[in-house]
Image: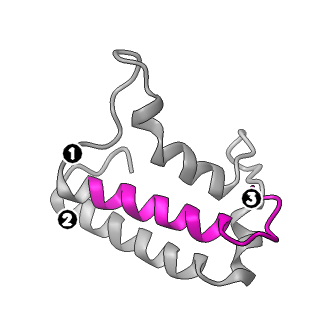
Amino acid sequence: MREGYKYDDKCLRNELAVLINYVATSLQSHSFFLERDSSNGDGQTFLEFLINQAVFDELNQVGSKKFLLSTKDEDIELKKLMLTGILYLVRDSENKQAH
């Protein structure tokens, strides 16, 4: 996500986000989004990763880090896709771990 600056890279990235959302519509897949990843050292779940990336720019202090997404259509689309995926995962009232 951080390295793709070409238009084609951003389109591919967004298509992958669409596929992730298709997977997230299945209740049986939610446990995979909530598994901790110990291989990268931070033990973050994929849901936590989505939330962090979706709100990165809003939580970013001015001047502290480079903004992740721009206001171009492709970046706005990605933000909407990430937020949609998050909503798929948390809308199930039985999914206490996601809440």
Q: Is residue 92 above or below residue 28?
A: above
Q: Please name the residue shown 77% across and 61% down the image.
A: 35
Q: Nearer the viewer, mark 2 or mark 1?
A: 1
Contact (CB < 8 A) between labels 3 and 1? Answer: no
| Amino acid found under the numbered disc labelled 1 | Thr
| Amino acid found under the numbered disc labelled 2 | Asp
Q: Which residue is mark 1?
A: 71
Which is more N-terminal, label 1 or label 3? 1
Q: What crowding class fits label 1: few (fewer than 14 Cα within 10 Å), some (14-19), or many (20 or more)?
A: few
Q: Quarter-wise, where is residue 64 in the image?
A: top left
Q: Please name the residue shown 33% across and 46% down the image.
A: 3
Q: Please name the residue shown 26% across and 61% down the image.
A: 9
Q: Which residue is mark 2?
A: 8
Q: Please name the residue shown 47% across and 42% down the image.
A: 55
Q: Quarter-wise, where is residue 15 in the image?
A: bottom left
Q: Is residue 19 above or below residue 11?
A: below
**Which element carries disc 1, helix, strand or loop?**
loop
Q: Which residue is mark 3?
A: 98
Tell me the CA gap for discs 2 and 1. 17 Å
Is 21 placed left or right of 70 in the picture?
right
In the rendering, at what x and y percent does residue 79 appear? 38, 55
Which span is picked out in magenta?
A: 76-99
* The C terminus sits in image quarter: bottom right
